[in-house]
Image (cartoon, rainbow, N blue to C red):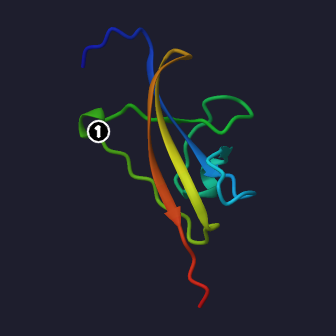
């Protein structure tokens, strides 16, 4: 592929909605493996951002396996593209985890 970016790389970070207030729209970064089983490499030491492999990019899809026991809540999965360490753009998807009380 061709790109004007010198060192493009993709990253992902998971955020969980703050539930201290029912009206809260704030999200807090949480470890990727709080939601997914998939193992990814840390992008930043001590941070929650993970590198997404750029191998086989022609598929343009990513599969992350959900954990078996999840904490209820609303999660925002943020996909980011960087040129070296400069954020270029990001997009996100929501994952809502609801546990039956049965």
Q: Which residue is mark 1?
A: 60
Q: At numbered mark 1, what does the secondary structure look like: helix, strand or loop? A: loop
Expressed as whole percent of the image width and height from the top left, the position of residue 8 reads 42, 18
In the rendered picture of this protein, how many numbered marks are placed on residues? 1
Expressed as whole percent of the image width and height from the top left, the position of residue 34 reads 64, 56
Expressed as whole percent of the image width and height from the top left, the position of residue 38 reads 52, 53
Which residue corresponds to the image point at 60% horizontal and 36% vertical from the top-left? Answer: 49
Tell me the quadrant of the picture where the C terminus can be found: bottom right
Q: Residue furthest bottom?
A: 102
Q: 98 or 26: nearer the eye?
A: 26
Which residue corresponds to the image point at 61% horizontal and 86% vertical from the top-left? Answer: 101
Which residue corresponds to the image point at 69% horizontal and 52% vertical from the top-left? Answer: 18
Tell me the quadrant of the picture where the N terminus can be found: top left
Q: Quadrant of residue 69?
A: bottom right
Q: Where 23 sits versus 9, above or below?
A: below
Q: Where 21 sits versus 98, above or below?
A: above
Give the crowd class for mark 1: few <14, some 14-19, many >=20 residues within 10 Å. few
Q: Is residue 48 left or right of residue 83?
A: right
């Amino acid at each position: 592929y061709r790109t004007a970016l010198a060192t493009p790389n993709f990253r992902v970070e998971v955020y969980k909605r703050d539930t201290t207030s029912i009206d809260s729209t704030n999200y807090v970064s949480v470890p990727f493996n709080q939601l997914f089983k998939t193992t990814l490499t840390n992008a930043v030491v001590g941070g929650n951002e993970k590198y997404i492999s750029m191998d086989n990019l022609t598929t343009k899809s990513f599969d992350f396996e959900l954990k078996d026991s999840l904490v209820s809540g609303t999660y925002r999965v943020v996909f980011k593209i960087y040129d070296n360490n400069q954020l270029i753009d990001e997009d996100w998807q929501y994952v809502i985890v609801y546990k039956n009380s049965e």
